[in-house]
Amino acid sequence: MKIRKQLVPVITLGFCLALKCVIAQAQTTFTLNVDGCDGGCGGTVPYATVTLTQEGSNVIVTETLNPTYTKGFVATGAGRSLEFNITGDPIITIIANPGLTSGFTIGTGTSPGVFEVGPAPAHVSTFGTFDYSVSCIVPSGCGHGASHPDMGPLSFVVKGVTINDFTANGGGFFFASDLQGVNGNTGNIANKTAGVALVTPEPASMLLFGSGLLALGAVLRRRKRTATSA
């Protein structure tokens, strides 16, 4: 009876540690495969992907261009580098992704940067109006028109939101980008389908999970030895 009483809290602790594994890093990927280039972007889809990664109360937004079918972000005036919507149209804060050593930088007077926040709303895209946008800065990021396409990376943090807050615009499009296709044509590409969700346990959660299993194993071995000696 005494062994059982001792066993209960340890087993409970083990399961609590193991269940920490459900605190995972949520991630959703959207494929930009709708061609809006003037005369077509050339090549085949996907042209790019947008990945949303939940980290605490913030979302990391990363757009990765497909170098086989795109030449980079451009500043033709027909859309922005990335346009998106958030439910309720709240006032948001966008900052650079601290995990990157280069790429997205918010332009200032002393540091022109590559990308900048705004305008908001963005209403010149082929795919309709979006509440928020990030633009390629001319000339430090992109040249005028298609004179200097930039492959990125484009990655930034939107503070105080969740992945589920990102929603489609009135036309049903979740994201749109102003790019140059592999054939030299420029224009917008977009996504019109729901993203694919992926949940991966964080390293710390996996460590807790392993600790929980080790604790359970140690208690069970001890209990077995005690029962054998009795």
Image (spheres, rainbow, N blue to C red):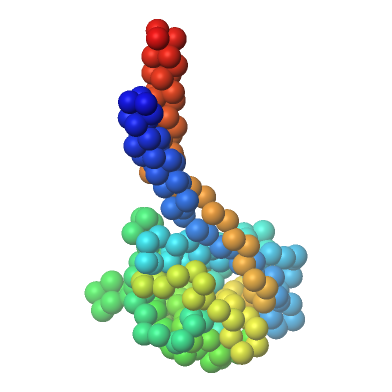
Q: Is residue 94 left or right of residue 176?
A: left
Q: Nearer the viewer, residue 167 or 106?
A: 167
Q: Residue at x 58, y 86 (%)?
A: 169
* Outermost top residue: 229
Q: Please state which of residues 177 and 17 is positioned toward the viewer in this rendering.
A: 17
- Please tell me whether residue 37 is drawn above or below residue 72 in the rendered image: below
Q: Quadrant of the C terminus?
A: top left
Where does the image place residue 65, in percent across and percent down from the top left? 58, 63
Q: Is residue 64 left or right of residue 31?
A: left
Which residue is at the far front?
A: 1
* Res 126 seen here: no
| Residue depicted at 63% across the width and 62% down the height | 196
Residue at 71% of width from left, 76% of height from top?
A: 35
Q: Which residue sits at x=34%, y=37%?
A: 9
Taking the image as drawn, is residue 96 in sight? Answer: yes
Residue 156 x, y percent position in the rendering: 41, 67
Task: From the top left corner, tell me how far across and down residue 60 is, in percent.
Answer: 43, 64
In which quadrant will I find the N terminus?
top left
Query: Residue 68, image x and y in percent?
Result: 67, 59
Total numbered circles = 0
Say left or right for 187 vs 3.
right
Q: Nearer the viewer, residue 6 or 146?
A: 6
The correct choice, above or below, for 121 with respect to 202 in the image is below
